[in-house]
Image (cartoon, rainbow, N blue to C red):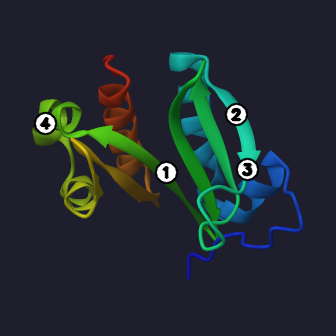
Amino acid sequence: MYERMLNKQVVPSFDDLLNYAGERSSLWMALDAFLNEKFSASKLIRFPYGNEYGWAAKYSKKSKHICDIFAENSAFSVFFKVDSSAVEKIYDDLSDYAKAVWKDAYPCKNGGWIDFRVLEAGQLEDVKKIVCAKMNTTL
């Protein structure tokens, strides 16, 4: 249903990633604008983490990794590592969906890797909250 772009031989453009996200591309563009305005994020199209992950846009602030956004058929997923202490500060302000995503995070040291599929505006707001907490700033 939410298949990713897995053909490693064909390097997509950012527009190709957005087109693949289909009706959710406007949400991705809103997140892209947020990351650019809030963090002056740089963006790099890459095929990270192995063959099952697919093509993504990596967002960074200088040398600090913010997140990867993976194109999916009619959706996109935001993939990033966040410390438990950052999430604890905003946990009560997150939706039930975001809390479930955090509960399913892949554990890593004092936090975890989140794979957060965005399908609606409320979920986008949760991603913004978590990213701001990760980057130690306010929304």
Q: Residue at x 72, y 72 (%)?
A: 6
Residue 72, above or below 18:
below
Residue 110: where, in percent of width, then height? 21, 41
Q: How many marks?
A: 4
Determine whether the residue tagged by mark 4 lies in a helix, strand or loop. helix
Quadrant of the drawing holding the C terminus: top left
| Distance between mark 1 and mark 2 Cα atoms | 14 Å
Residue 32, above or below 104:
above
Determine whether the residue tagged by mark 2 lies in a helix, strand or loop. strand
Residue 100 disc label: none
Mark 1 / mark 4, whichever is N-terminal: 1
Q: Residue under label 4, please give it.
A: 88
Residue 92: where, in percent of width, then height? 10, 40
Residue 72: quarter of image: bottom right
Q: Residue under label 2, please give it.
A: 43
Are the two marked residues, 4 and 3, in contact with CB atoms closer than 8 angstroms? no
Which amino acid, mark 4?
A: Glu
| Distance between mark 2 and mark 4 Cα atoms | 28 Å
Tell which of 2 and 57 is nearer to you.
57
Which amino acid, mark 1?
A: Val
Q: In the image, is 90 to the left or to the right of 11?
A: left
Residue 32: quarter of image: top right
Mark 1 / mark 2, whichever is N-terminal: 2
Mark 4 / mark 3, whichever is N-terminal: 3
Residue 15: where, in percent of width, then height? 81, 49
Which amino acid, mark 3?
A: Arg
Tell which of 95 and 7 is nearer to you.
7
Residue 133, above or below 52:
above
Q: Residue under label 1, please give it.
A: 78
| Distance between mark 1 and mark 4 Cα atoms | 19 Å
